[in-house]
Image: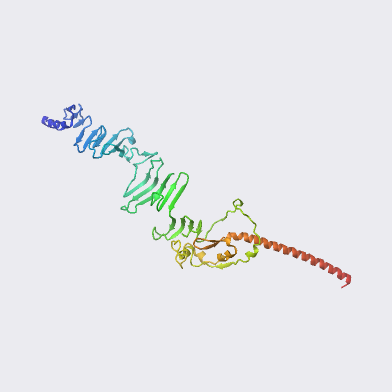
Amino acid sequence: MKKFKFLIIFFICPFLSSHAQITVSPNNLIGINNPNPLDALDVIGNPVFGTATERLSLGSGSLGFNVRVATEAIYNNGLFGYQFQHIGSSTAANDYLALQVYQPGGSLVTQSALSINGLGQVGIGYTNNTINGITYQLAVNGSLFANSFTGNGINIQNTLNGQNGIISVGGTVTVNNNNGINPIFTINGNSYIPGGDSYWINSSGDLGIHLRMLNNGNDSYIDTYPDLFFRTGSSATSGMTHCPMYINNSGVGFNTTSVVSAVTVSGTVTCTALTQTSDARIKTNIQSMTSTLGTLIQLRAVTYNLTSFSLPSIVKMNNKNDTIGATGGSKPQGLDSIYINRSHMGFLAQEIQTIYPNLVYTDKNGLMSIDYIGVIPILVESLKEENATITTLQTTVTNLQATIASMQTAITALQKKTGI
């Protein structure tokens, strides 16, 4: 037994300084700088193991790989250093083990590359899993890549401006990288984007094709380039054949992608009320209309049926602004069968243009339209002119009736005198 003890002491001595004290207890426990060893090898101090290539350093609550725990110095300046450090606390959330990283030469990269606390909560880039008042089982500071991830919720924090999160999702979250092609991000629950942050699709900046949802703290926006389609159909690809709403720089199109004004509608519009701004304060050069009856009677009212070409089809025939669906000779897309098949009443824009050119508009594709509301003032003034004429005629008739009555009285008197 004494020979065995001697061999152990002989083996350990090369790692000890000349001032180290070695104690062997009656229970064959060896202490280094520890007169009362409790384990097979009980050391008080910071032992170091290994060679000059890379050394392992032990300290109170610390374990360093190529790092001297006492001074945080790097042993081999050609390699990175790593150190596990235990931060003790009586509170489970504040008691944690952290992995620290050092660059070659000794500068600290991060104090919290990886940490785990007494509650089993894991932090990557964090040593405290309570962020902005919310506690997370896994907190990640930086980009997160997952080939496949499923969970009950995810919150990606924005620690730079202290917001509650760039994206907060309640419910089921599924992230699948799909082998690096067409990554999939599925949310089954609620999604939250705080003020000042954006959610981008296809791009992280204003350049290039993109879709962005933005909330600036007061208002919410959807930014898109170049155009925004709202489509419906039976599938997410070829089945999306109908475009009930379309937005571009010219305006909004309903049931058409050929937007020629602020609002372009291909089909019927149903509403409970329709008004047109007509405040006198926004008008100038106001003049009363006169002599409208003569031109009004030149209008030719007609009945008609629509051709088989809707607005998108006409545009396509002219090789301008090609649209989804709509081919020459087919049923116009977006126009319901009741509207397309019934007989209509109205005017022809080309004829109206020769009489009231201000009531006719021609869009960028050459398609003409009529301001039917503008016909109302002409009708009103024409009715007033007609009413004035009728009033004059009524007065004339009344005067003639009075004259006839007077003449009838004179004739009666004359007959009495003459006995005729």
**Residue 193 in view, yes or no:** no
Residue 283: x percent and y percent? 60, 53
Q: Quadrant of residue 160?
A: top left
Classify the position of the C terminus by image quarter.
Answer: bottom right
Could you say which is closer to the camera, residue 330 or residue 419?
A: 330
Residue at horizontal 41 percent and vertical 52 percent from the top: 211
Locate residue 83: give its quadrant: top left
Nearer-the-camera pick, 136 or 248: 248
Q: Position of residue 179 (x, y in %)?
A: 30, 53
What coloring was used for the rendering?
rainbow
State whether residue 399 is above or below residue 198: below
Across and down, in percent, residue 6 comes to 12, 30
Tell me if 358 is positioned left or right of 239 in this view: right
Vertical order, 418 against 99 (above or below): below
- Residue 1, position as x, y percentages in the image: 11, 31
Which residue is at a point 58% across and 67% down the rendered structure image?
302
Seen at 44% across and 51% down, the residue is: 223
